[in-house]
Image (tube, grey):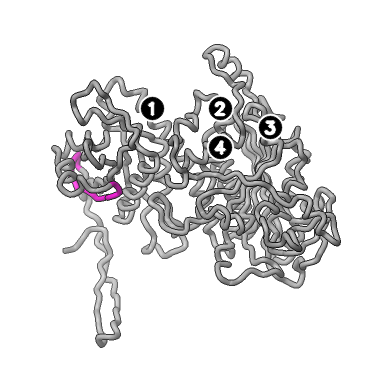
Amino acid sequence: MILPGRVLVRLSFRGCPRVLTISCQFLHEVPEKANEKKLIGLVGAFICGRPHGGQLSPALEFIDEVFVKNGLKERINKTFYPKNAGCVDTFPATFLQNNYRIAYAGLNLRSSSKVNDNSTDTQDRIVWPRLSFGGLRSCVGKSVQLLQRQGISEIFVDPLTNAEAVSEAAHLAAFRFDELKSQCKQLSKPTISCFTAHLDNDPDAFSVKEQLIASWNRGRILAESQNLARRWMEMPANLMSPKNFAYSIQETFGGLPSHDDITTRVTVYDQDWCEQNKMGGILGVGAGSSRKPVFVEIEYIGDPSRIKDHIALVGKGVVFDAGGISIKPSLGMGDMRADMGGAAVVAAVVFGLAQLKSPINIRAYLPLVENMPDGAAMRPGDVIRMANGMTVQVDNTDAEGRLILADALHYAQHNPAAASEPALLIDIATLTGAISVALGDQYTGLFCNTAVMRRSLSDVWPPSQQQQQQSSTDGSNFSLPRSLIGCLNQCGRAHSDPFWHLPSLYFRQLQESCHLADLSNITTGVHAKLGGSGSAASFLQHFVHHRIPHIHLDIAGVMKFLTDENWARRGMSGRPTRPLIHFLDYMARTPRDIPTVNECCEEGADPAST
């Protein structure tokens, strides 16, 4: 049988029982027939477990009743029910002049699910919004990946109970970095859309459909932003020099559509500029590489009426970290192509905020270097002078991330182009391997100074005049205290990408143990092997004024997905892009404009298990 649109291959086998040789001869390619029906994928879900087992999600219920004549429900009841949740299968169907492959997976009702006690119909008693967020992600992710492996290029997904969460899971699951492989080894890159046909004939569902599409698009932007960070982190170091990374950022932001009220600007500075600004940390780390350091500044103005106010983001951008003279072991060194994960996440966060047209002002700073051993490289015992004038004794050249971050943090507070100090300063870095010892691969390590603990969201980014006017007319209260750390933690739980607050350690010991300079870049002596992540956070606090709220996120532990997840394949993760976008966007908007994190988060659920 000859299949249209496929390359035919003749295989021949020869050899003894122990040796098998396969030769391959390509014959020809058969063109697709003009009247060949299109193959489209659909993703939905059904309920597992009594008493509601077998109930289909709204979109699948519509398709089953209108087009399939209950064939899908019969198939599920015969093959799945009452099996446990997590099973996924496909159902072929033909209607509307197209071939469809319907992927569906089972979902468990939460124990706290509400039912409509006034209803006598079992099928009407389920309240779908009580389904677990983790279950939605798993169900949709596995189904999308199954259809993708089958080569389907167009997929429609039932929004289920949370269109934003479903959209995130679908787009994250479909990502795979295989662009450097041969074309025949690449997976299809399907277009993924929200299925809303079941609402078309309901005149009262127009506003519901608009809300679904808006939530779906928001989830798509969040997921695509994280996928952008994943792509940058996966790119091999020979293709991702500091200069190439900077140009890629420029090209990415250059593709954004222009808006009258929104300004996005990317500026790339060379090594001479770093020398003029006396950035000894950046220059010292980059001295061992033939590929010179680059400093990138991204400016996003989403609220021109508050041009003087801004949030500063700093991302560690070591495009490859061999450790310098204190060279790393060869095992796992290839993963150090992603040591610029902090810079990738920061750029992706600003890109996501720009796509959402978030009414907030951001200045992002990305020091991009390569840490290599060379005759000109920085040596253990060297003393370098930082941008703020302090001298640092480099006792370990593999503790280089904090050196480039220190210069960038200083510049973020004293940028001559900024009208004021940042209202909030956040740095993101794959800084220490010790963080994965403490938190594993599930939590991002969060450190902060006392200024963060004393401030709420409204202290950092006060409501605009328009928001204050709205609060007086609709009863909204913008003066409610909401801690920065509490809100960030809730955003992390909402996206199954949680944070864990840890203490900074050995602030004084970094000074007292240093023999040659003001500060050592690592703890030595009796504290040499203690609290590596906390001491790194303390080192950075020497370069941030105590009055400026400063949050440090150590993402080394969550840098990659170690195994294939239901909604993400093994590889670089791009975490925590989505919760940071949510956090900053939530800070800038009224509660009416964006769902609160409480609406997204499962109460009482373990964030690591969702």
C-alpha distance separating marks 2 and 4: 12 Å
Q: Earlier in the sequence, mark 2 or mark 1?
A: 1
Q: Position of residue 32 (x, y in %)?
A: 24, 55
C-alpha distance separating marks 3 and 1: 40 Å
Q: Position of residue 598 (x, y in %)?
A: 48, 31
Res 159 visible: no
Residue that label 1 marks: 210
Q: How many marks?
A: 4
Q: Earlier in the sequence, mark 3 or mark 4?
A: 4
Say which mark, if any, is on residue 589.
Answer: 2
Residue that label 3 marks: 454
Is 610 on the left or on the right of 539, as rendered? Answer: left
Q: Is residue 125 above or below residue 501?
A: above
In the depicted view, which residue is nearer to us: 148 or 514? Answer: 514
Proximity of marks 3 and 1: CB atoms separated by less than 8 Å:
no
Q: Amino acid at mark 1?
A: Glu
C-alpha distance separating marks 2 and 1: 20 Å
In the depicted view, which residue is nearer to us: 483 or 398? Answer: 483
Segment colored magenta: 85-97
Q: Amino acid at mark 3?
A: Arg
Few, some or many residues within 10 Å of mark 1 (<14, 14–19, 20+): few
Q: Amino acid at mark 2?
A: Arg
C-alpha distance separating marks 1 and 4: 21 Å
From the image, give the main secondary structure of the stretch colored magenta.
strand
Q: Residue at x 68, y 46 (%)?
A: 365
Say which mark, if any, is on residue 353.
Answer: 4
Q: Earlier in the sequence, mark 3 or mark 1?
A: 1
Q: Residue at x 76, y 36 (%)?
A: 547
Quadrant containing the C terminus is top left
Few, some or many residues within 10 Å of mark 3 (<14, 14–19, 20+): few
In the depicted view, which residue is nearer to us: 369 or 523? Answer: 523
Q: Position of residue 58 (x, y in %)?
A: 27, 33
